[in-house]
Image (cartoon, helix red, strand yellow):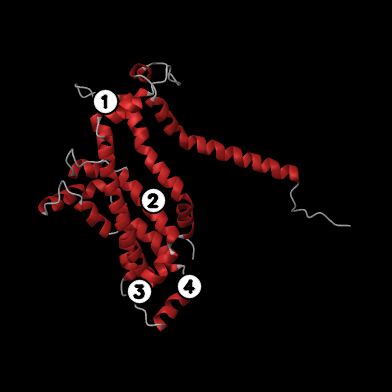
Amino acid sequence: MSATSPFTKSPVRVRVNRLVLYTALVAITGLFLGPFGWLVLAGLKTPAELAASPVHWLPHPVQWHNFADAYRLIDFLGYARNSLIIATIYATLVTLSAAWVGFGFARLSAPGKKTLFGILLGSMMLPQMITLLPTYLIFAKLGMVDTYWPWVLWGLAATPYLVFLFRQFFAGLPRELEEAAIVDGCGYATIFWRIFLPQSWPVLSASFVIAFTWTWGDYIAPQLLLSTDRTTLAVAVMSTYVTSAGTPVADLQAAASVMYVVPILLIFLVAQRGFVAGMSTSGLK
């Protein structure tokens, strides 16, 4: 006669717990998707419906032509290409530079390393507005305004948050990997490129997605440093769809914003497995 463990849950209780969990997950998902859903609906309405009080929740009739008009009224592909170039350059360079710096903090020993790492983390507390004017003056003196060189230099300089991710990941790798490579005559540069970097694909994926999203969604830097022809899609969406009096055309802005967000969603859907793995493993030892 087998005794039932007091810790064994009944099938009914398990199903109830799962139902509660799934209900909570659906509610949280709806909470996060709500703003995007409202943006899609706004892109399908007329200006009168957007300004109506009380709120018209559903468009009637559906204005599908808003998306075509938003695409046609500006050089949408041209601005998207500018955003893609800048975001890809920055995301690639900052991922590699952050990985190199994180490797140094994780595996190398030097006087003052902990102090430098603390200063690096402390720099994340600085608001972007504090460094905005000095950054512009530096790039203006170097003749880099209205070029993509600022994003190249920013990418080569790494960024504290991504350095922290790579440092945490590299610190958790076995010491035997490094010692075996040193015995075989490898230097630290070879160890990084041939052993540690290939092992860090989850963090590489997460870092690239994060950096790409930062740059794709940045409005301040392109607005400050680039001319109208070279600017990004974020700036074009916010500043181009206006009337002759300067009033924003809300329905076209909403439709353009939906098309602006779609590439980021596609990138995340493609790289989500590596992104989640990188965010979950970078804090483990």
Q: Say if residue 159 shows up in the picture.
A: no
Q: Amino acid at mark 2?
A: Val
* Circle 1 residue: 248
Instruction: Give the quadrant of residue 169.
Output: bottom left
Which circle marks residue 209 in the picture? 2
Instruction: Give the quadrant of residue 193.
Output: bottom left
Query: Which quadrant would the N terminus be assigned to in this image?
Result: bottom right
Classify mark 2: helix, strand or loop. Answer: helix
Question: Would residue 273 appear left or right of 237 to someone viewing this image?
Answer: right
Q: Mark 1 or mark 3: which comes first in sequence?
A: 3
Q: Amino acid at mark 4?
A: Pro
Label 3 or label 4, whichever lies nearer to me, is 3
Contact, mark 4 vs mark 1 (Cβ under 8 Å): no
Q: Mark 4 or mark 2: which comes first in sequence?
A: 4
Give the spatial CA distance, label 4 vs label 2: 26 Å
* Circle 3 residue: 190
- The crowding category of the residue bearing disc 3, from other C-alpha atoms within 10 Å (few below 14, some 14 to 19, many at least 20), is some
Give the spatial CA distance, label 4 vs label 1: 56 Å
Give the spatial CA distance, label 1 vs label 3: 54 Å
Q: Say if residue 15 shows up in the picture.
A: yes
Give the spatial CA distance, label 2 vs label 3: 26 Å
136 and 196: which is toward the camera: 196
- Residue 165, percent from left and from top: 40, 59
- Residue 80, percent from left and from top: 29, 40
Q: Residue at x 17, y 51 (%)?
A: 134
Give the spatial CA distance, label 3 vs label 4: 17 Å
Q: Is residue 232 above or below residue 150?
A: above
Label 4 or label 2, whichever lies nearer to me, is 2
Classify mark 3: helix, strand or loop. Answer: helix
